[in-house]
Each structure stands twice: as structure tokens, then as C-alpha cells.
Amino acid sequence: MYQPTNQPTNQPTNQPTYLPCFPKYAC
């Protein structure tokens, strides 16, 4: 689903701002 190698410091589960980008993760 999400690429931990692309955003190691910014996790969608840890960052509420990544919520809209979590289902798509096109950011």
C-alpha cells in the first residue's frame, strides 16, 4: 500500500496530514 522506502520519516499512520494521501498515496 504505502512505500516505507519512499517516506521513512513520514508514515501515513503517524502523520494525520497523510490521511488523504493514504488510500491513494499518489503524493
Image (spheres, rainbow, N blue to C red):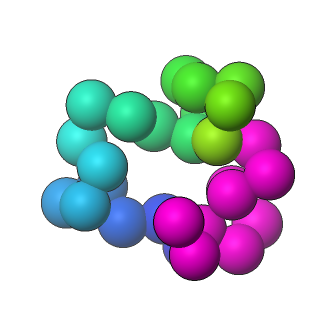
* As drawn, 3 above or below 14: below
Q: Is residue 24 magenta?
A: yes
* As drawn, 14 above or below 26: above
Apparent side of residue 9 relative to residue 14 in the rendered image (left or right): left
Residue 24 drawn at (x, y percent): 71, 74
Q: Residue at x 30, y 49 (%)?
A: 7
Apparent side of residue 8 relative to residue 21 in the rendered image (left or right): left
Residue 3 drawn at (x, y percent): 36, 66
Where are the magenta residues, as a range? 19-27
Which secondary structure type mostly characterizes the magenta part of the structure? loop
Residue 1 drawn at (x, y percent): 55, 73
Q: Residue at x 19, y 60 (%)?
A: 5
Give the tally of numbered discs.
0
Q: Residue furthest front?
A: 27
* As drawn, 13 above or below 7: above
Q: Quadrant of residue 6?
A: bottom left
Q: Is residue 8 magenta?
A: no
Q: Residue at x 61, y 33 (%)?
A: 13
Q: Residue at x 71, y 26 (%)?
A: 16
Q: Quadrant of residue 23?
A: bottom right
Q: Quadrant of residue 4?
A: bottom left
Apparent side of residue 2 relative to residue 18 in the rendered image (left or right): left
Apparent side of residue 11 relative to residue 12 in the rendered image (left or right): left
